[in-house]
Amino acid sequence: MTIEYAPCGLIGVLTPQANTTVEPELHILLPPGIATLNARLTSDKPTIIARLLDYLRDLPSSARQFANAPIRALAFACTGASYFAGVREEDALVARLESELGIPVITAATAVRDAFHAVNARRIGLVSPYPDDLTEAATRYWTERGFEVAAVSRGAMADGAFHPIYAMSAAGAAAALAALPEGRCDAIAMLGTGMPTLKPILDRPFHAGAPVTSCMTALAWRSIRAVTGEPVDGASFLAFTRGEEWRERYAARMSG
C-alpha cells in the first residue's frame, strides 16, 4: 500500500506531551517520501521522573493510537524514560512491542546506541540538558550499555519557562557542546529530544575529531534505515551527522 504523502514509508512517532522540538526537527531530518504520524505520550503525574516512567511503561497503549495506520516503524522520541527504566526494562519492552506490531521499534536511546556502535565508539561524551538526577541516570544507562562515559557537559536549563528543557535554546546547547573537554571521546551525544541540536551539529559535526550526534538526529537516521532497509553503518551515520541529507532543508526552514 502506498501512502500519498509517504510513498517511501510512514513512521509512527510517540512524542512527550509538552515537547516542542520533535516534530519540527523530524520534518527537517526526514527525506522526501518518508513522513510521520505523530501521537502524544501523556501523563498527569506531578514530577518529570514519574511522567517519564509513565511514558515508557504505557508505550504499548500509546502505540495503539495509530490503530491500523500502515506505519513501517515506531519511533519513541523520549530518552529520559529509558534512563530511569534502565536497559533491561527498555529492551524487554521493545522486544515485546516488536513482536506484537511486527515492525521495528526504535527508542531514541537505542538509536544513539546504534550510532555509537556504527563508529565503534567506546569512550563517549554526553551533553546533558537535564537536572542532576536525570544526568546521573543517563550516565548509569550508558555505562550499563557498555560504554565508558569519559566526559559530561551540562546545558543551562530555561528556569521559569513553560518547561526547563524544552525551552532551551540552540545557542545554549552549542555552548554546552563546546565546553566538553577535547580529546577524551570517540563519539558524543547531545541528550534529550527536547533540546534543539540541529544548528549546533551543523556548526560542529565533529568535536576534536569525535562525531557528534543527538537523540533526534540518531532517531531520524535509525528510523530512516528501518523503513528503507539501508545499512546501519558508520558511513551513513557520519554522512547524516555532517548534515549531508538535511542541511539544505534546515536552511530553507530557518530562513522563514
Image (tube, rainbow, N blue to C red):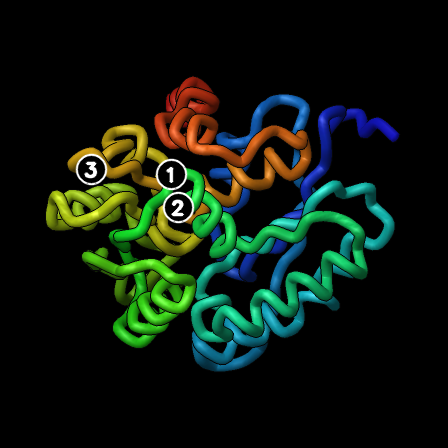
Q: Which residue is mark 1?
A: 119
For residue 216, say whether it is visible.
yes
Between 44 and 100, which is closer to the camera in this rendering?
100
Q: Is residue 32 left or right of residue 146?
A: right
| Quarter of the image that includes the N terminus | top right
SS of the residue under disc 3: strand
Amino acid type at mark 1: Val
How far apart, in angstroms, are the residues tagged by discs 3 and 2?
Answer: 15 Å
Please say if the residues under marks 2 and 1 sit with CB atoms less than 8 Å apart.
yes
**Residue 143, placed above or below residue 232:** below
Q: Earlier in the sequence, mark 1 or mark 3?
A: 1
Amino acid type at mark 3: His
For residue 256, say whether it is visible.
no
Q: Quadrant of residue 40?
A: bottom right
Q: Which residue is mark 3?
A: 207
Q: Which residue is mark 2?
A: 116
Q: Is residue 231 left or right of residue 20?
A: right
Q: Earlier in the sequence, mark 3 or mark 2?
A: 2
At x 51%, y 44%, the residue is 219
Q: Give the x, y percent position of residue 184.
A: 16, 49
How far apart, in angstroms, are the residues tagged by discs 2 and 1?
Answer: 6 Å
| Circle 1 residues within 10 Å: few <14, some 14–19, many ≥20 | some
Please say if the residues under marks 3 and 2 sit with CB atoms less than 8 Å apart.
no
Q: Quadrant of residue 33?
A: top right
Amino acid type at mark 2: Phe
How far apart, in angstroms, are the residues tagged by discs 1 and 3?
Answer: 15 Å
